[in-house]
Amino acid sequence: MGGRIWHFSLEFFFVLICIFVLKTWVFPFFISIWFPISDMTELLHEWTLLMVGVITLFAYMGLGSTAKWSYHLNWKVSSALFCFYHLPFFVLPWTWFQQMQADWTYLVGELFVLFGLQEWDSPFSILIISCIAFLFGRWMKIKEKDEQGGRLVSRHKVFVQK
């Protein structure tokens, strides 16, 4: 069980850190290169915020699905891990964690702020939304259709489609 939790933890942090790096550095860098002085820059920045918010919610759903179907973690363990990963944002008063909390809140929070839902911008409401997306992802199982014979392929089993 410990190995599965360790691997899931690595995947969890890798996915969120990649989304954060793309939002903070990569997308603004390329927007500033391609559109140096333009009103299009602001429009593209807003579209990037919308896109990153939606991608982050889908990533939480994917992580919930991965926790159940790939790592075989029950809902109690995966919910406890989710809370454990997000607990430092709310408990530790260090400046570094406060900055991380603000950055994490803006991954999903700016999606709601752009639509005028200012009350949904608090870290606690973003935690609830992320947790709901994570738990909703536990009910999703991703299957791919194989090119040979119409078989649905999952990571662990092969399902025959009738």
Image (spheres, grey):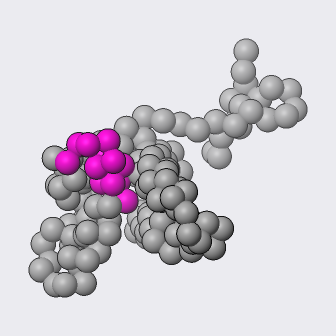
In the figure, residue 13 lies in which quadrant? bottom left
Q: Quadrant of the C terminus?
A: top right
Q: How many marks?
A: 0
- The one of 59 and 36 positioned closer to us in this rendering: 36
Q: Position of residue 71 (x, y in %)?
A: 49, 54
Q: Position of residue 3 (x, y in %)?
A: 46, 69
Asked whether, in this view, residue 50 is left or right of residue 105, the answer is right
For the question of whether residue 126 can be seen, the reply is yes
- The one of 152 and 110 positioned closer to us in this rendering: 110
Q: Quadrant of the N terminus?
A: bottom left
Q: Residue at x 25, y 69 (%)?
A: 101
Magenta span has 35?
no
In the figure, residue 82 lies in which quadrant? bottom left
For the question of whether residue 15 can be seen, the reply is no
Magenta-colored span: 107-118
Q: Please say if 84 is above or below 48.
A: below
**Dominant secondary structure of the magenta stretch?**
helix
Q: Position of residue 42 (x, y in %)?
A: 47, 59
Farthest residue toward the right?
148
Q: Position of residue 29 (x, y in %)?
A: 57, 74
Q: Residue at x 63, y 45 (%)?
A: 156
Asked whether, in this view, residue 127 is left or right of residue 65, the answer is left
Q: Residue at x 17, y 55 (%)?
A: 122
Magenta span has 108?
yes
Q: Please say if 134 is above or below 105.
A: above
Farthest residue toward the top?
162
Q: Residue at x 26, y 64 (%)?
A: 86
